[in-house]
Image (cartoon, rainbow, N blue to C red):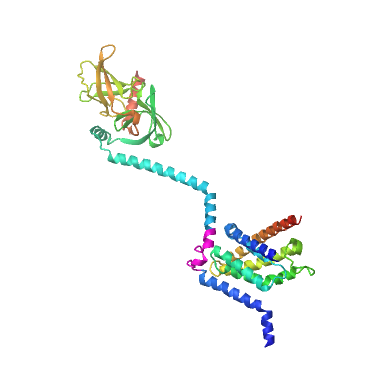
Amino acid sequence: MAVSFLMRLMWTVSLIVLQVLVFNHIQLFGYATPLVYVYVLCLQPLDTSRHVWLLWAFLTGVAVDMFAFIPGVGAGSMTLTAFFAPKLLQLFAPKDSMEDMMPGYVTLGGWKFFWYVTAVVILHHAAFFMLEAFSFYNLKDLLLAWSGSSLLTIASVLALAALRNRKQEYNKV
Amino acid sequence: MRRLLDFFRRYDYWLLFILLEAASLFMLFRWGRYQNAVWFTSANVVTGRLLEWESDVWSYVHLGTRNKELLERNLVLERRVEWLMRRLEEAEHVPSSGELRQEELLGDMALVHADVVNNSVNRRSNYFTINKGSDDGVVPEMGVVCAGGVAGIVYQTTPHYALVMSLLNHNSNVSCRLRGTDYFGFLHWDGVSPLYATLGDIPLHAKVKEGAVVETSGFSAVFPAGLFVGRVKKVEFSEDGLSYQLKVNLGTDFARMRDVCVIALPGRVELDTLRGKAVLEK
């Protein structure tokens, strides 16, 4: 338990650093910025309490906001997503899955994991860009930013998950 | 009551959710539009340090480009310094009487100012290149002068440059006279010292003194009459003994010549046609 908590913490910190140092600089076509820290929502086991979900997501959002100078946007959207994520995960999780199952290619199966990630990312990005648009964008830009960033984030998160998957397999051997 | 408590216990994560969202929105509206939310932005120790590292890394990555930019900038500034130094020199320069006279003589002529871009003084046939060419109206056989006096004759031109046959060329042959006497001869260069040339064919009955001024005679279409060439250094007899041969100290220091003027004489074309006719009639 403690180990998996530490692992999760390390992943979260790495994701924040990665987001701040690398992904915040990507602005494909001036719109699409992958927000990979959403991946922390794929690191919570099925039996995580709702409070932990919410707090974990909120703190991650606050940390990212600090570096992006848009306080509240990341925190708000992450909290909102974390509110719905457990329900989504239950929806996609197989009936016979373990209580501490973590979402991944192996546990959910490739397609289901893909849909879980897609749902989480689309939800988060919608909240994120709408909160941001409160002061910055117009509708067309908002839709472009939302869809473009969602695509990039989904691709990035799937790639990260694949990386993690391979590492775990390697550790098993 | 108990059911109410049960309800709260069961859905207390709702409360947490609302609390956290409220906190987020508070942050968004309270600080989102203010750069001076100091602790929240770059002044924060952790954030500041991390962003500093990041900027260090990026600046290292961009060093190559920076270096190139600096180099280019340096080049521009160096050229500028050079240009300004020259302007300063020009501004501080007090024109000598010879230069004033030259200015007076050339005042009503079309002059093309040019810079010497290539020069030689140590060959038997010396040429120099100037940075004005046929596009600027320079054509072969135009005279070239500099501040010290006559410098040479345009030999060939390209659109932007001209090759000038310097006086220090054994093919050069400029008609000159002694100022105040009208006795004239031809100025040659013997190929020895870039400081001296020889003025030949001065008749023996002319009274020549050392230090007399040698100027252009105006008999050619190349130079107008009266342009300073040099001063007589030594009076000698020619080999056949029928005329004087004067060693002339040239006014132009060819070794450090930089700014020159090309002279376009207005009567040039007419003179050329006349001469052509004369040749044909012969």
Q: Tell me if I can see residue A70 in this picture.
A: yes
**Above or below A148: residue B113:** above
**Image spot of residue B152 (x, y percent):** 34, 28
**Screen quadrant of the N terminus of chain A:** bottom right
Which stretch appears magenta? B33-50
Q: Relative to the observer, which residue lies in front, B72 or B35?
A: B35
Q: For residue B67: magenta? A: no
| On-image quarter of the C terminus of chain A | bottom right
Q: Is B188 located above or below residue A84 in the figure?
A: above
Visible residue check, residue B142: no
From the viewer's side, name the closer residue of B53 and B87: B53
Q: Is B41 included in the stretch rendered in magenta?
A: yes
Q: Quadrant of residue A49?
A: bottom right
- Where, by quadrant of the figure, is residue A15 drawn? bottom right
Residue found at the far right of this picture: A96
| Nearest to the observer: residue B267 or residue A50 | A50
Looking at the image, residue B117 lies above or below residue A11: above
Q: Position of residue B195 (x, y in %)?
A: 31, 24
Query: Would you identify the image quadrant in which residue A54 lies?
Result: bottom right
